[in-house]
Image (spheres, grey):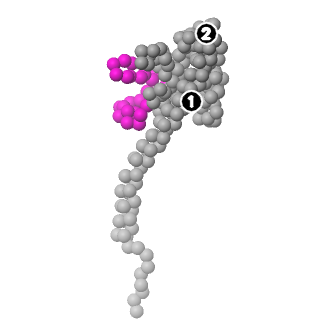
Amino acid sequence: MKKTQKGFTLVELVVVIAIIGVLAAILVPSMLNYVKKSRLKTANSNAKTAYNAVAENVADAETNGYALSAVLTAETDASKWKITAGTVYDAKASASDAGAEKIAAALRENGDEAGCFKVAKATISGQASYVVLWAKNTSDEMVGRYPDAVSWDSWKSEPSHETISNFTITKGSSTISAAS
């Protein structure tokens, strides 16, 4: 009588390993894009949170007679609502500007992911306004923006990415430098 063999042949094992390799080659890049897309959505969402806190701060300042320009240029009279445009604030740390501290407090509600933010002067529809940028840290290239949030398609098509410290916004023929 002949013994029956149990187990798999070497060829069968090689075929299974090859199939797993092909599946991994297909799935890993799409999974990495999924993670990056998720990080960008989080960054845009946190930028919106900061934008809403800035809007509340500006509305409070305007109610007390101070214009947006006074809040963003840090006039001494408007120091209670002060946010220095172009300054990167760490939301985990205490901000020296009173208005920035209010925005930092709103972001700290996110816990360890408070990140850092910057408010930049902008002209939107011909009116003086502002744009808020958010990143997990100052060296992160995944920078969220509000209003006009960064889309995944535009982010991934960029050949290189800027950090929050040197981020510029190009819209049509105009460029808004978030450093000013």
Could you classify mark 2 by the number of other residues whose Cα lies within 10 Å: few (under 14), some (14-19), or many (20 or more)?
Answer: few
Q: Position of residue 38 (x, y in %)?
A: 48, 41
Q: Which residues are magenta?
A: 150-177
Query: Which residue does the image show at 41% across and 81% down from the upper left?
Result: 5
Does the magenta-highlighted stretch encompass residue 140?
Answer: no
Viewer-side residue, 87 vs 160: 87
Q: Which residue is mark 2?
A: 65
Residue kind at label 1, given as amino acid type:
Thr
Query: Which residue does the image show at 36% across and 70% down from the upper left?
Result: 12
Could you classify mark 1 by the number of other residues whose Cα lies within 10 Å: few (under 14), some (14-19), or many (20 or more)?
Answer: some
Residue kind at label 2, given as amino acid type:
Gly
Q: CA distance from mark 1 to mark 2?
A: 25 Å
Viewer-side residue, 11 vs 153: 153
Query: Which residue does the image show at 47% across and 14% down from the upper left?
Result: 128
Q: Position of residue 111 (x, y in %)?
A: 63, 35
Residue 81 in view = yes
Which label's residue is closer to the chain start, 1 or 2?
1
Residue 49 disc label: 1
Does the magenta-highlighted stretch encompass residue 170?
Answer: yes
Residue 123 disc label: none
